[in-house]
Image (spheres, rainbow, N blue to C red):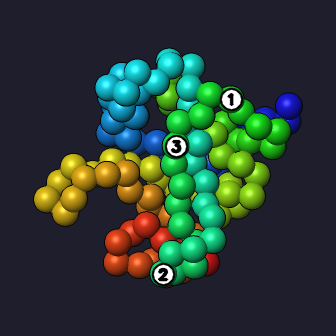
Amino acid sequence: MSNQTDTQTDIILTDKAVKQIKRLKEDNNIPEEYGVRVGVKGGGCSGMMYEMGFDGETKDGDTIVEKDGVKLYVDGKSIFYLMGTTLDFSDGLNGKGFVFENPNANKTCGCGESFGV
């Protein structure tokens, strides 16, 4: 497998995101060895949408980002759009959920779930 590991241009996980991912794994009985697959796909009001879900295995070409025992898997196509992105978790007054702070996004929609480059 041609996997890369944590470089300056990879996704940055905040402590709050790591804590929430661990909580979700525990609450939903997700096996400890599972990581979180993060990617982008076409769609949404701005052209592209973020995807997230638990995954038990890596795929050829994945970039693997790890922090405090939490692994993110990002496919080779998606990493191009997500380089330098910070993945955070917000539980404030404006809603609750994972937040992508993407420096590559030239436009975003109001809901924050889609973007354009």
* Label 2 – label 1 distance at C-alpha: 31 Å
Q: Residue at x 82, y 39 (%)?
A: 60
Residue 101 at what x, y percent from top left? 44, 61
* Label 2 – label 3 distance at C-alpha: 21 Å
Does the image show residue 72?
Answer: no
Residue farthest to the front, as pictured = 28
Left or right side of 6 for 46: left
Residue 67 vs residue 62, the one in the foreground: 62
Q: Residue at x 19, y 63 (%)?
A: 94
Q: Quadrant of the C terminus?
A: bottom right
Residue 19 vs residue 24, the one in the foreground: 24
| As drawn, 62 above or below 80 | above
Residue 28 at what x, y percent from top left? 37, 27
Who comes first in sequence, dot 2 or dot 1? 2
The secondary element bearing badge 3 is classed as strand
Q: Residue at x 74, y 41 (%)?
A: 62
Mark 1 touches mark 3? (CB < 8 Å): no
Residue 26 is drawn in which quadrant? top left
Q: Quadrant of the N terminus?
A: top right
Identity, as a three-letter code, of the amino acid under mark 3: Gly
The secondary element bearing badge 2 is classed as loop
Residue 113 is drawn in which quadrant? bottom left
Label placed on residue 30: none
Label placed on residue 57: 1
- The residue wearing badge 3 is 53
| As drawn, 54 above or below 80 | above
- The residue wearing badge 2 is 45
Left or right side of 61 for 13: left
**Crowd band around label 1 with a 10 angstrom C-alpha radius: few (<14), some (14–19), many (20+):** few
Residue 21 at what x, y percent from top left? 40, 34
Identity, as a three-letter code, of the amino acid under mark 1: Glu
